[in-house]
Image (spheres, rainbow, N blue to C red):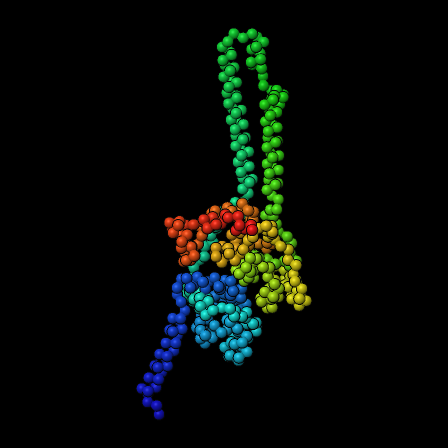
């Protein structure tokens, strides 16, 4: 028979071992704000399409995943290649697989340990956050088209308004001069004929037939015609507001708005190349192998995606944003290095059922942005010398060559 004290020590040792394991598990998850921020970026770009922190979406809720999983190494292996872990007969992996409709998780083989741990840090931070009301804020200056929209028209409008004001002032001054001359002439000895001329009544007929009135009419007509021609010239090649009908009624309002899927999950090219590629049907099927009925259109539109995959035929999407061949634009440079949000150029995409070109996308619009946008040089040694040259003051994009012709034209 085992001595009671021996059993007590055994239980205490077991409890201590479990406590140490849990403590070491938690200690491995960073609380550094920079790591959590990196984890948020990775989560939004790669995980948010299928997972939420506190509720089940396509995959399970991730709150407390570090407590439920056998170990952090298990999580790393599952994230990199879930199918391999499931195929190995792992009991917990197969349990998750069965509970989630036997839907295979996307493999993230390129993720490093640090990246996976950054995601875990973000998940833990979000799990431990107290419930709070999130205030909706509107970005300052977020008017239609963004910075620099309608610049030529605004200048011409200001010029025309200025000219009209000057003409009105001239008319007032002329009226005052005429009244002054009449009072002066009334003090003179004038013949009856001259007095009739001085005090001749002003009628509509005399105004219309006067040279001054004719000049004003001709001037206004010529100015409006000139402005119309200039506006027409400036609008050549500008497709702001262009919203073509697509072969599939895909709603960004549902995907990016209602379900908060990060733009970069589907448009993967935006973070690693020049073009923000149009997603292939295979990316759509990451979710739609399970979701076969749409929020707005039922099964009809999703069936088109399934048909494209089954017949191996591409979907003929209509391009919305077109830059001329003479202009070079790199998405990854702006998204990764500049940290520019998609909505800065594409507008509130999460509110659009049908995508439209939100901004002007003209040369002047781009230059205006480069003149106003601050460079995020914090923590980037590449900018150390430049910051010294600028006395550690905030630098605009124009200060680092953002207005050089060869940046966009070569």
Left or right, 325 with reference to 24? right
Residue 340 in sight from this viewpoint = yes
Q: Residue at x 50, y 20 (%)?
A: 176
Q: Residue at x 55, y 43 (%)?
A: 150
Residue 143 in sight from this viewpoint = no
In the foreground, 234 or 203: 234
Instruction: Give the farthest residue toward the right.
Output: 311
367 lies above or below 78: above
In the foreground, 66 or 379: 379
Residue 307 locus on image (x, y percent): 67, 65
In the foreground, 387 or 183: 387
Residue 66 locus on image (x, y percent): 44, 71
201 lies above or below 379: above
Residue 226 locus on image (x, y percent): 60, 35
Q: Residue at x 60, y 68 (%)?
A: 289
Residue 65 locus on image (x, y percent): 46, 71
Q: Residue at x 64, y 64 (%)?
A: 305
200 lies above or below 409: above
Q: Could you tell me which quadrant the N terminus lies in?
A: bottom left
**In which image quadrant can residue 6 be found?**
bottom left
Left or right, 276 with reference to 113? right
């Amino acid at each position: 028979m085992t001595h009671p004290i021996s059993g007590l020590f055994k239980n205490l040792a077991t409890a201590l071992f479990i406590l140490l394991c849990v403590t070491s598990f938690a200690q491995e998850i960073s609380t550094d704000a920079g790591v959590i921020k990196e984890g948020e970026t990775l989560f939004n770009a790669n995980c948010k399409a299928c997972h939420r922190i506190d509720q089940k979406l396509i995959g399970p809720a991730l709150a407390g995943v570090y407590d439920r999983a056998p170990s952090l190494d298990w999580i790393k292996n599952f994230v990199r290649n879930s199918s391999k872990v499931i195929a190995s007969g792992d009991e917990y992996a197969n349990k998750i697989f069965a509970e989630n409709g036997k839907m295979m998780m996307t493999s993230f083989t390129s993720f490093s340990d640090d990246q996976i741990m950054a995601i875990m840090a973000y998940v833990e931070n979000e799990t431990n956050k107290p419930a709070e009301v999130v205030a909706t804020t509107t970005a300052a200056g977020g008017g239609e088209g963004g910075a620099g929209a309608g610049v030529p028209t605004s200048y011409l409008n200001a010029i025309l308004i200025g000219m009209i004001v000057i003409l009105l002032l001239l008319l007032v001054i002329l009226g005052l001069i005429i009244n002054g001359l009449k009072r002066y002439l009334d003090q003179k000895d004038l013949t009856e004929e001259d007095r009739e001329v001085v005090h001749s009544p002003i009628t509509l007929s005399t105004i219309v037939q006067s040279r001054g009135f004719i000049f004003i009419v001709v001037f206004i007509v010529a100015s409006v015609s000139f402005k119309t021609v200039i506006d027409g010239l400036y609008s050549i090649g500008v497709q702001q507001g262009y919203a073509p009908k697509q072969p599939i009624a895909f709603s960004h309002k549902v995907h990016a708005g209602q379900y908060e899927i990060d733009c970069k999950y589907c448009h993967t090219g935006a973070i690693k190349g020049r073009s923000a590629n149009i997603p292939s049907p295979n990316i759509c099927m990451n979710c739609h192998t399970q979701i076969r009925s749409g929020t707005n259109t039922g099964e009809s539109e999703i069936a088109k995606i399934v048909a494209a995959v089954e017949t191996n035929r591409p979907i003929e999407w209509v391009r919305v944003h077109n830059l001329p061949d003479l202009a070079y634009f790199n998405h990854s440079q702006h998204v990764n290095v500049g940290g520019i949000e998609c909505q800065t150029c594409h507008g509130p995409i999460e509110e659009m059922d049908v995508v439209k070109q939100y901004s002007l996308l003209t040369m002047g619009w781009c230059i205006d942005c480069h003149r106003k946008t601050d460079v995020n040089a914090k923590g980037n040694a590449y900018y150390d010398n430049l910051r010294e040259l600028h006395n550690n003051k905030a630098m605009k994009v124009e200060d680092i060559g953002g207005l050089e012709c060869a940046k966009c034209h070569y």
